[in-house]
Image (cartoon, helix red, strand yellow):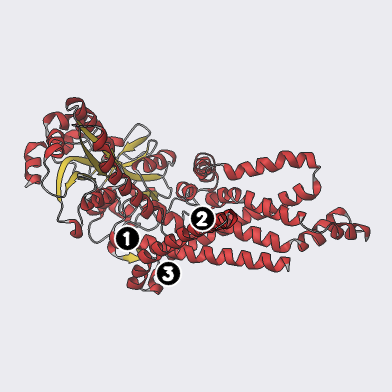
Amino acid sequence: MKAGWSMQILSLALCLFQILLPGCHRGQVEISVVGSTSVQPFAEALAEEFMARHPMEKIFIQGGGSTAGIQAVLSGASQVGMSSRKLEASEKELIAIPIIYDAIAVIVHRNNPLDGLRLEQIRHIYAGKITRWNEVGGKDRAITVVTREEGSGTRETFQNLVLGKNEEISLAALVQDSNGAIRQVVADDPNAIGFISLGLVNDRVRALKVDGIEPSIENILNHRYTILRPFLFVFKSPPGGTAKEFLDYVLSPEGQKILMKEGLVSLGQNAQAEARK
Amino acid sequence: MNKEKFLERGFLLVALSSISILALIAFFIFEQGVPLMWKVGLKSFLLGDRWYPSKGSFGIFPMIVGSFWVTLGALAVGVPLGLSSAVFLCELTPPKVGMVFRPMIQLLAAIPSVIYGFWGLIVLVPLIRNHLGGPGLSILAGSFVLGIMILPTIISISEDSLRALPRTYKEGALSLGATHWQTIWRVLVPAARSGIVASIILGMGRALGETMAMIMILGNAAQIPSSILDSARTLTTNIGIEMGYASGDHRQALFATGVVLFFIVMGLNSLAMVISRKGRA
């Protein structure tokens, strides 16, 4: 119930912004960027830099989730949507541009003796076929499997790249609704396993090697660590004006550098250009 | 129109507007949720045990079971504590002590549920994980926190109904030679039964509706739990945890979950009303 209302209120608030604000600051151009809470903190960092350079242009960043952002772009309430999931068939009329890539790390408690797992083992753990740590070389304890909620971009990526088409994430898995909540549960529970954005791994949890490959920027750049997903900017029509300038700034070496400082991975101009086609 | 009529109309309008908001909300939930229930089939929606909305499986039976167990657990914690607190406040304590206790209990109702959730997560969950096993995020933890959250409802309504009893009941019982204790358990509590039951049902409604704290404590696994140390998901947390990214059928399925919740809570509240009215008659 709350979902519907909060989304309604969000779009209403956005509309009001659109109507009221241009009148107050004459000469200033404003756009709103709405969507995925995974992308939001990075977009905020970028917008701040961008506005420092372009004092006459103002960018409002808001969360609400990938779907809320896509809806806002579809309805015209917002110029730019942020999405951490792929567009669905019904949303294909929109233009999606990958701005950066985010690796997903498989994390365990810092005292977990395991160094890494094979992709296949991770798949079986999440599918509920392996339920105890000693089956993969750990202690004789039940595994606490932690996953994101249905609809989350991170979950979708993990499902596609780790479990594949034929396996489902077990219904017995604990479900948390943010990267931070998963990290919290895994940091507290010595038997837990979870997955979060690589940039959010801290010293309270440990990222596992997958098939012997450590999730590091280096391994991502040389295409050895492949649990990756793009963060998308979504537009209704080919962007122009401030939206275009902001996009160009985000894709510029400078913008990409800011993002890489936050633990995200730029796959270079070629990959970007390819994706834009 | 004279001033009084005018004011009357004004108040009527205000009252109507609050009812119409209720009607609007109900309409919106039904309009969004019912088509999906129809599409999936009422039976496989209510009794299906697979919840993979992105793959087109919409079974909310695990959530119905989850809500049931968590609510039952909350009552198991809240009713004995609440009822004995009500008896204590009404019968066994000097008025001055009651004046200290009552505001404190009301304060319980004023604590935001996220604080309860946080407390449960930081204190209860590790306790359960370390001493009883399992992930700690469990029905047991959720029941305990909810049991405390429904205390104010149970205590205040039970106490009111105990206080509303005619003095003659107590005087009669005592003059017949019953001890104070016998008077309480054999005469007063049974006489206030309808109010006490109503308080329990309203507490149930509160427990069923709680979302934030339960998202934090229950672990939200969409499975049918097999022990109280298992994680569970309730109807409300199903909506709360997935609303951010849900679209299309998935979003409608969350509204449909709301429809089910709507009927359960309506049923409980009507029951409470009927029972408390019976008691008065």
Return the residue at label 2: B14
Which mark is in front, 3 or 1? 1
Mark 1 residue element? helix
Q: Residues within 10 Å of mark 1 (few under 14, many from 20)?
A: many
- Number of the label disc, if any, that sits on residue A248: none
Query: How far apart are labels 3 and 1 at the CA level?
Result: 15 Å
The residue at which mark 3 appears reads as B46
Quadrant of residue A19 within the rendered picture: top left
Q: Secondary structure at mark 2?
A: helix
Label 2 near label 1: C-beta < 8 Å?
no
Point out residue B103 in the picture as x, y percentages from the top left corner: 67, 41
Q: Which mark is residue B250?
A: 1
Q: Earlier in the sequence, mark 2 or mark 3?
A: 2
Q: Amino acid at mark 2?
A: Val
The residue type indicated by label 1 comes to His
Where in the figure is residue B178, as x and y percent of width and height? Answer: 90, 58
